[in-house]
Amino acid sequence: MDEPIIRTVDVRKTYRVSAGTFKGKRSLHAVNGVSISVKRGSVLGLVGESGCGKSTMAKMILRLEDITGGEIYMNGKPVSSVSRKHIARNIQPIFQDPYSSLNPRKNIYSIITLPLRALKVDGASDRHKQVDEIMGVVGLAPRLKYNYPNQLSGGQRQRVAVARALIMHPDLVLCDEPTSALDVSVQSQILNLLIDLRKEFGLTYILISHNLAVVQHMASRVAVMYLGRIVEEADTQALFRNPRHPYTQALLTSVLTPNPHLGLPETHLGITYPNPIDPPPGCTFHPRCPKADQRCSREAPQPVVEKDHLVECFHPEPVS
């Protein structure tokens, strides 16, 4: 059986943050025991509300943040035992906002070749050819390589970000909300580009998003995150057909539809997100859950797997 490209085991990240004036510092558990596995050639969608820990998880995989507990394995080796350069050669990110992730003082050639220069890969004589090739792959005219980011559209900027990530031919591309800052008409172009590149180069993606339509379109497996925990994980078709956790069900009901007669969707979760510095006891979702009972407020549920469908809930929907 092939070793997963990325496997995390009970990964935790705790920050010490101020609780207010004269109150000192308290612990904020941004990621609280997350275990995921990403197979080669697959797309794992990591979804949840803002503040649930998705981007923190991404930063730990990239070694931009140190883990507090647990372990992350890359191709079977703990990432703590390999250099940051080794991580950068094998894992490349595509960030959310192409306006801020590209250096406005550098031209496109310099931006795309930055990983090559930072990791001292190949000689300068080969780089123009490599840049021309990768720009063609992502749908950019090579003549644009001497332009600056402010001379490009938002979609072109994100294609530059994709080219920069792929110039190293990484095993894994970590996409953190890759289309949320773009116009709707451009979003589909970038998503289809990522799908085509995955097929052409055999790429593996971790796709972080709050947009369930994007995740359903791209992901082969989905993990739903709430307040630092994975509360449900399953194959994409199974999760969208049979969401078992009340939180996943609420997220799916929040998706806008083109039918004007249905009106605006309502999650029935309220407008208040729990304070991660002072999370609720027991199941952290119970104050917002329509199925919660006294047990939910006292005990924390443990993850249960049935038919490769993980759920962390005392009252899950049955597996269909």
Image: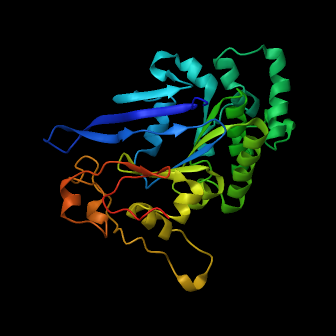
At 27% from the left and 61% from the top, the residue drawn is 286
Q: Quadrant of residue 24?
A: top left
At 61% from the left and 32% from the top, the residue drawn is 92
- Drawn side of residue 113 relative to residue 12, left or right: right
- Drawn side of residue 255 relative to residue 105, left or right: left
Q: Quadrant of residue 120?
A: top right
Viewer can see residue 63? no
Q: In the rendered image of this protein, does residue 231 appear above or below residue 90?
A: below
- Drawn side of residue 64 relative to residue 87, left or right: left
Colour mapping: rainbow
In which quadrant of the rendered image does the N terminus lie? top right
Q: Position of residue 26 (x, y in %)?
A: 21, 39
Q: In the rendered image of this protein, does residue 262 appear above or below residue 208?
A: below
- Drawn side of residue 163 relative to residue 104, left or right: right
Q: In the rendered image of this protein, does residue 290 appear above or below residue 88?
A: below
Viewer can see residue 226? yes
Q: Position of residue 48 (x, y in %)?
A: 45, 54
For this rendering, which residue is in front, 228 or 36? 36
Return the residue found at the far left: 22
